Image (cartoon, rainbow, N blue to C red):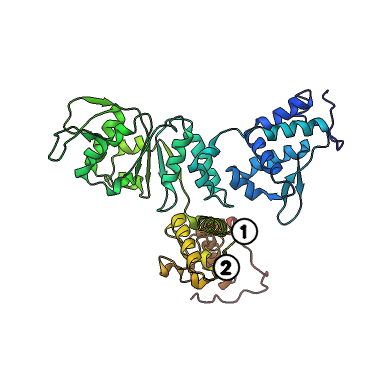
Amino acid sequence: MTGHARLGNGQPLPPAVGEAAGDLETAFRTLVRSPLRGGLLRHLQERPGTVVDVDALMAAFGCLRVDVENCLAELVRFGVAARRTGSPDGYTAARPALAPLERLLAEFLRRPAAAGEDVSPAVQRFKEMIGRDEKMLLVFEWIRTAAKSDISVLVLGPTGSGKELVARMIHELSRRGRETFQAINCAALPDTLFESEIFGYEKGAFTGAHDRKPGRLELADRGTLFLDEIGDLSLLAQAKLLRVLEDRSFERLGGQRSVAVDFRLISATNRPLDQFVLDERFREDLFYRVNAFAIRLPSLRERPADIPVLANRFLARHCLAAGLPADARAFSPSAMTHLQMYPWPGNIRELESTVSRAALSAPGRLIEPAHVEFLHPRGAAGLAPESPRLLPTLADIERAHIGRVLDAVSWNKKEAARILDISRGTLYRKILDYDLAPPVAPASRPAPRSIR
């Protein structure tokens, strides 16, 4: 088949996969060579007649909207997918018009899906945390990037946002994925236990040391060491950790022989380490060591549109775990509004536990606001999630105040500048920046009114 090959619907093969490839088989193999295009094609073809919206595909594949839409457009042009308009628009599987293409598609679907990141349990768990907000998809891209090398990673985020899950994902997607993952909570590790826990000890090193015990560093050899809440380490512990990071060797407690280790370090904290450095509570040299690549997890308050998506997802999983159909419980509209009004200081972890309690409390299928019990009741008293739509920016407040003053003095700029305590030049600049203008050009200028 030449570069003029056409599909059964009369459309020519896409230039990228048709004319350049030379024949239909090569063109199809080029199409599905992309893991995302191949995955999307398999996803749609395994659900014939089902219209899937882009948001659902973004969450399922952990990819940004632009990437998903571009790949879907190529599938549509090739004739193996179709776009359906609706609310919202979506995509569905299409039957190829050409018999050879239908044969190639059938062979592709019979082949097992290529093993990749989808086999990782941590990836599957993380995808449950992805909703409609693309902030988490960007985090996913950072995770994929970090997993390609052994660079030290610092995961930043509030309590309950999934920092350890991110660390496990990086480990499982990296070349060290088959080796051990050692996690240590530094906040629960006093100085008296730090050395024995991290470095291990020899027999007879202290009273009660009846046998040699390998430390977490030794257990993490060829694998990954995860230090959770690294900001809680004492300065003494920080100095010992820095020595290991520089030398890649250590001595067990009570030992005299250096032990070489090859490990990848991932750290996490909800503390402002940069401020700790300024306050001399965290070593600057260690900060640069652990912060070679930073990943920041957004709080649930930063993505309020995801709350209904995640709540329904957690509810369905709870029902399945209890041996019930996935739709055995459902939130009423008022209950969902109740969830969205809460600030979620515990983030994803708190949302998941709250949904489980609500599912157990509801006597029937419908979950009402009375069945939703929050861990911080004060936070539920009418507080809405922080979002740009609900809380004005500083610029919005300044623009509104300057406009109010100008209106109060009938746009007497000299008087407005005096009240605002700024120069007239600054006032003119702000009027231009904020695109302010008097509502009606006044015929006469009355006396200024007082500002209260």
Q: Amino acid at mark 2?
A: Arg
Q: Amino acid at mark 1?
A: Asp
| Crowdedness near tag 1: few (<14), some (14–19) or many (≥20) residues, C-alpha within 10 Å | few
* Along the line of sight, the residue nearer the viewer: 193 or 17: 193
Res. 417 in view: no
Res. 318 in view: yes
Residue found 28% across the figure and 31% down from its top: 244
Q: Name the residue that disc number 2 marks.
A: 365
- Percent across and percent down for residue 287 are 33, 39
* Along the line of sight, the residue nearer the viewer: 65 or 78: 78
Query: Circle 1 sits in a helix, a strand or a loop, which is it?
Result: loop
69 in relation to 410, above or below: above
Q: Name the residue that disc number 1 marks.
A: 435
1 vs 2, front mark? 2
Query: Circle 2 sits in a helix, a strand or a loop, which is it?
Result: loop
Give the Cα distance between marks 1 and 2.
Answer: 53 Å
- Percent across and percent down for residue 146 are 47, 35
The N terminus appears in which quarter of the rendering? top right
57 in relation to 12, above or below: below
